[in-house]
């Protein structure tokens, strides 16, 4: 059987080579197919999720992988920089169409110290931090930054690995023993010797992230800020858009645009941020880290945005115009960790969109995600409660929902008491409501905002 050539004569890119074959590579390939592109993958696991959509080459088959593709990208920031540099050099010689993102983005993202130093160079605020090469330097950092602090490997580590929270002086020795091998490169955390980084604690109200795409001509398009919740250091839930963050959107877009322009970046990038207070008591953002790839907190965009993060990344890599990043409907995305739910129970919930990664079950492994996007935004929280009820691993959301119900009842009781006494009416309940994640107060306010966004 033969098929017609679907490519224009002038089209020089037909196959995209992706470094990595995980679920991100899989979803990139899913986005590439409707645009007329095929994908191949460099991945040692032959039954990886991306294998459903294209040929998989092992790292020993690098030359064959290179020969099979016209342009290259990646789905995992811990890809060896030497490989990325080799692929980038091919575009300079004219034999290939490019490697996106550029090697410098990987070099920065793989080193937390370089990352924080870049933020500060670009006048993007961060938590206070210090480099640590010895137990003596760690003690000094604890003294300078004040306890508690988070001690991290500057290279390697993800999903909460390679970190130690030091709450009191007696924790210092244990923290150093746990992470010291990273300094010499002898441990399993990283084969590359690298200093540790001590980060000061800051009071923050929530964690948010912004995702943006940058084209080869320098055009940047940004998605809405989203709010993220973690379970055991792993992203559990993303709400898009983040409630009540419109006043922070410009600061976030300015920051990520500055970073992308500084790096000469092409493709999709995520910037993780903390919402805190500045010296005047106003909301402000602190940069935590970048991810030089499509990002878990952007999975909602498959259904919830005009153009998904995956399609925009493909567009950037093959030098097509970027698509509209507007949120078409408020959404909540949940990661499925460790054990698959009953798909029938999930899909019986209106507005539920199920994405399996075709992985074997394993504790805390990301094996699927579900995006909730009911037609009526007022149904979003009830749909979330229904979904959590049918998940084998509830990623802590059942406790959070129960706590919210309890706190809301307390707030309602206090409001009644204050109204009856006609003293400080609503003040106590307001203070409680502000501290409750996904509270009725927030949802009532933002239902109108979300509805207005949909109408737009």
Image (cartoon, helix red, strand yellow):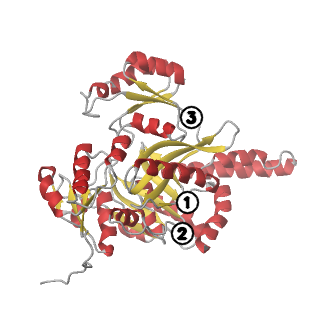
Question: In the rendered image, which quarter is residue 106 located in?
Answer: top left
Residue 11 or residue 47, whichever sits in front: 11
Answer few, some or many: residues within 10 Å of disc 3's Cα (few below 14, many 20 plus, some between 14 and 19).
Answer: some
Mark found first going from the N terminus, 2 or 1 = 1
Disc 2 target residue: 329
* C-alpha separation, residue under disc 1 versus residue under disc 3: 24 Å
Answer few, some or many: residues within 10 Å of disc 2's Cα (few below 14, many 20 plus, some between 14 and 19).
Answer: many
Residue farthest top in this picture: 136
Q: Is residue 269 above or below residue 192?
A: below
Q: Is residue 420 visible?
A: yes
| Residue displayed at 47% across by 56% down | 211
Q: Give the percent coordinates (x, y) of residue 449.
A: 65, 64
Q: Give the percent coordinates (x, y) of residue 338.
A: 33, 52
Residue farthest right in this picture: 422
Q: On residue 202, which mark appears?
A: 3
| Residue displayed at 34% across by 27% down | 179
| Residue displayed at 73% across by 48% down | 430
Q: Quadrant of the N terminus?
A: bottom left
Disc 1 target residue: 241
Q: Give the percent coordinates (x, y) of residue 121.
A: 49, 37
Q: Is residue 200 left or right of residue 18?
A: right
Mark found first going from the N terminus, 1 or 3 = 3
Numbered-mark total: 3
Secondary structure found at label 1? loop
Mark found first going from the N terminus, 2 or 3 = 3
Q: Is residue 242 above or below residue 81?
A: below
| Residue displayed at 26% across by 32% down | 192
Q: Is residue 65 left or right of residue 416?
A: left
């Amino acid at each position: 059987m033969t098929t017609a050539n679907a490519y224009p004569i002038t089209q020089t890119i037909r196959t995209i080579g992706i470094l990595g074959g995980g679920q991100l590579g899989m979803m990139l390939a899913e986005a590439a197919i409707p645009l007329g592109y095929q994908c191949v993958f460099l991945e040692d696991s032959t039954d990886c999720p991306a294998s459903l959509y294209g040929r998989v080459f092992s790292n020993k088959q690098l030359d064959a992988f290179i020969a099979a593709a016209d342009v290259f990208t990646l789905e995992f920031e811990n890809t060896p920089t030497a490989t990325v540099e080799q692929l980038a050099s091919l575009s300079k010689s004219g034999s290939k169409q490019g490697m996106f993102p550029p090697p410098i983005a990987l070099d920065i993202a793989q080193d937390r110290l370089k990352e924080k130093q870049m933020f500060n160079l670009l006048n993007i605020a961060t938590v206070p931090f210090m480099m640590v090469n010895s137990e003596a330097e760690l003690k000094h950092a604890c003294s300078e930054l004040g306890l508690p602090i988070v001690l991290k490997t500057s290279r390697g580590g993800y999903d909460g690995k390679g970190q130690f929270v030091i709450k009191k002086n007696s924790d210092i020795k244990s923290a150093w023993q746990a992470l010291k091998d990273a300094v010499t490169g002898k441990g399993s955390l990283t084969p590359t010797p690298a200093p540790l980084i001590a980060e000061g604690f800051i009071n923050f109200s929530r964690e948010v992230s912004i995702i943006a795409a940058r084209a080869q001509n320098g055009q940047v398009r940004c998605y809405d800020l989203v709010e993220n919740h973690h379970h055991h250091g792993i992203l559990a839930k993303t709400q898009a858009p983040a409630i009540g963050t419109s006043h922070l959107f410009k600061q976030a877009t300015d920051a990520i645009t500055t970073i992308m322009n500084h790096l000469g970046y092409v493709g999709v990038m995520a910037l993780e941020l903390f919402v805190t207070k500045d010296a005047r008591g106003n909301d402000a953002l602190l940069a935590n880290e970048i991810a030089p790839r499509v990002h878990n907190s952007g999975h909602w965009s498959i259904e919830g945005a005009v153009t998904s993060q995956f399609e925009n990344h493909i567009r950037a890599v093959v030098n097509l115009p970027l698509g509209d990043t507007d949120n078409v409907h408020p959404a909540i995305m949940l990661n499925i960790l460790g054990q698959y739910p009953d798909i029938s129970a999930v899909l019986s919930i209106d507005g539920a969109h199920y994405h399996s990664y075709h992985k074997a079950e394993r504790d805390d492994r990301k094996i699927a995600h579900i995006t909730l996007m009911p037609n009526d935004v007022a149904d979003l929280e009830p749909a979330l409660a229904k979904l959590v009820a049918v998940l084998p691993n509830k990623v802590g959301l059942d406790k959070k929902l129960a706590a919210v119900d309890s706190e809301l009842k307390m707030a309602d009781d206090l409001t009644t008491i204050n109204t009856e006494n006609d003293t400080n009416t609503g003040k106590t309940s307001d203070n409680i409501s502000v501290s409750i994640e996904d509270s009725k107060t927030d949802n009532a306010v933002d239902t109108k905002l979300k509805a207005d966004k949909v109408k737009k």
